Image (cartoon, rainbow, N blue to C red):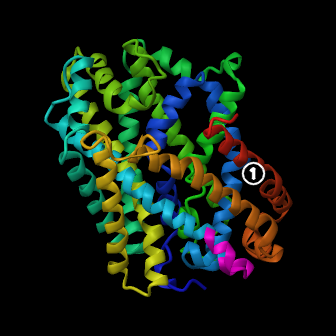
């Protein structure tokens, strides 16, 4: 039984929404659309869905098995299943990566908050050069981006401090439906624009002539990062699952929600972009430089509509970021609470304090203090590279090896099948996938992200 059994999620809906919220983030609303744009549209989406089945769901179930069986924080969980304490290093890597991600992710989330306020005050107007200068002036400011990032950390802190049921589950039940509603409103508005049908066609009409090895590796990587594999997030949340929860079904539902939101994000962006003739592969600058200009042009005949859409869009980004930072915070909070035997509020404070330091340094490195670099990169980019390109793939790879080869087979089977009551016929397929297919896929992602293949 979990050590803190009173912290278990209250309902199955809470489990699905909270865990889906941990996966749904800026990666769905920002990274997925521009990756789709760069890789030919619908063909990329089909490859992505295939990769979800090939890697995403088996990888999720691996972390679920470790977390639910151990019923404790990620560090202790990896040592408990096999009885070999050396595996605790995988958990430590997850704790460290979660703190780093929470810290630098809060910088970007803070930008979303600032752009939300700027949208409300109708400051995101003018031509593309004006919007570019607006972003440059803000990102290079000494204090304003830091204050926005710290505000986001404070919002996350307040949720996690309330506990699993009173904070994470309750807020997830509110934020996830709200996020979905906002997304649908913007999608409908975007699809009603003149010329929007070209964007819809681009998104849903496959062009397999554009599929290359690069496309396939990008789809594999997007499936991996979109579901937050390798951060110990899924392992931590699974420690709050009840024994009756069907892990396969839950993983499938979470992957479905995550994929649906990513596709809706494409429907939000591409029809509007095609309507005004903006390239669909605008890259990482999409949400802070390109899209404000798209909204201004697309709704130029009815500025009031453009004003409302801009507000809704940045509110959507902020909500998506918050569902992700909550899960990142909980990983380290669970660790500090159990390993240091601290009251939850003190554990939350330690995690928030560590993230605050990383947030400040990362924010300064993006403009105000350009000397804050490691290996020739701003600290924010360096932390992003360290976690996304090195720590996450390594953690996920070791998790599949751990569950596939080192954890007791009976334990893995019992957790996967809920002691023989569900999904028994799929167990051999799952075992083959995590022993052979998933490790190969993760190694390919790892080498691709490093630019080796």
Q: In this view, does 350 lie to the left or right of 260?
A: left
Q: Residue 156's x, y, as percent?
A: 33, 62
- Locate residue 73: give its quadrant: bottom right
Who is closer to the viewer here, 407 or 271?
Answer: 407
Who is closer to the viewer here, 336 or 1?
Answer: 336
**Depicted 184 relative to depicted 210: above or below:** below
Q: How crowded is mark 1: few (under 14 residues within 10 Å), some or many (20 or more)?
A: many
Q: What kind of secondary structure does the magenta stretch mostly adopt? A: helix
Q: How many marks?
A: 1
Residue depicted at x 44% and y 21%? 271
**Depicted 148 relative to depicted 348: above or below:** above
Q: Is residue 265 visible?
A: yes
Q: Magenta segment, which residues?
A: 79-89
Q: Residue 239's x, y, as percent?
A: 57, 74
Q: In this view, does 155 lie to the left or right of 382?
A: left
**Depicted 28 relative to depicted 45: above or below:** below
Label 1, on which residue? 438
- Locate residue 150: give its quadrant: bottom left
Q: Say whether residue 379 is magenta.
A: no
Who is closer to the viewer here, 240 or 293?
Answer: 293
Residue depicted at x 55% and y 46%? 226
Q: Residue 4's x, y, as percent?
A: 50, 84
Q: Say which element carries label 1.
A: helix
Q: Is residue 124 left or right of residue 240?
A: left
Quarter of the figure with the N terminus: bottom right
Q: Is residue 421 visible?
A: no
**Depicted 211 relative to depicted 2: above or below:** above
């Amino acid at each position: 039984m979990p050590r803190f059994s009173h912290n278990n999620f209250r309902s199955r809906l809470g489990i699905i929404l909270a865990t889906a919220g941990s996966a749904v983030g800026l990666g769905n609303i920002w990274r997925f659309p521009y990756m789709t744009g760069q890789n030919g549209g619908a063909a990329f989406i089909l490859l992505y869905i295939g990769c979800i089945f090939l890697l995403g769901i088996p990888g999720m179930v691996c972390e679920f098995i470790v977390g639910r069986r151990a019923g404790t924080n990620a560090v202790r969980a990896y040592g408990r299943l096999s009885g070999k304490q050396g595996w605790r290093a995988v958990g430590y890597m997850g704790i460290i990566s979660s703190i780093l991600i929470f810290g630098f992710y809060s910088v970007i989330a803070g930008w979303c908050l600032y752009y939300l306020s700027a949208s409300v005050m109708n400051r995101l107007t003018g031509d593309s050069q004006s919007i570019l200068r607006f972003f440059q002036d803000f990102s290079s400011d000494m204090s304003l981006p830091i204050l926005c990032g710290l505000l986001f950390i404070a919002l996350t802190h307040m949720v996690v401090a309330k506990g699993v049921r009173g904070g994470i589950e309750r807020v997830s039940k509110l934020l996830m439906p709200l996020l979905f509603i906002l997304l649908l409103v913007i999608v409908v508005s975007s699809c009603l624009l003149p010329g929007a049908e070209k964007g819809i066609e681009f998104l849903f009409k496959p062009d397999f002539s554009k599929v290359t090895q690069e496309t396939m590796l990008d789809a594999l990587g997007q499936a991996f990062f979109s579901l937050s594999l390798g951060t110990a997030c899924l392992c931590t949340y699974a420690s709050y699952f009840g024994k009756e929860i069907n892990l396969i079904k839950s993983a499938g539902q979470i992957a479905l929600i995550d994929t649906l939101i990513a596709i809706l994000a494409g429907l939000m962006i591409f029809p509007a972009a095609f309507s005004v003739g903006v390239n669909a592969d605008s890259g990482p600058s999409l949400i802070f430089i390109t899209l404000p200009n798209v909204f201004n042009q697309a709704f130029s005949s009815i500025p009031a509509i453009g004003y409302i859409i801009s507000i809704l869009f940045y509110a959507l980004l902020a909500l998506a970021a918050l569902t992700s930072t909550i899960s990142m915070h909980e990983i380290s909070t669970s660790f500090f609470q159990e390993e240091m035997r601290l009251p939850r509020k003190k554990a939350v404070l330690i995690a928030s304090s560590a993230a605050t330091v990383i947030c400040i340094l990362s924010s300064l490195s993006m403009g105000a203090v350009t000397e804050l670099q490691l290996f020739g990169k701003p600290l924010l980019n360096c932390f992003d590279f360290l976690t996304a390109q090195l720590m996450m793939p390594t953690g996920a790879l070791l998790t599949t090896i751990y569950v596939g080869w080192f954890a007791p087979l009976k334990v893995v089977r019992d957790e996967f099948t809920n002691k023989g009551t569900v999904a028994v016929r799929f167990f051999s397929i799952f075992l083959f996938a995590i022993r052979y297919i998933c490790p190969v896929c993760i190694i390919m992602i790892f080498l691709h992200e490093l630019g080796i293949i």
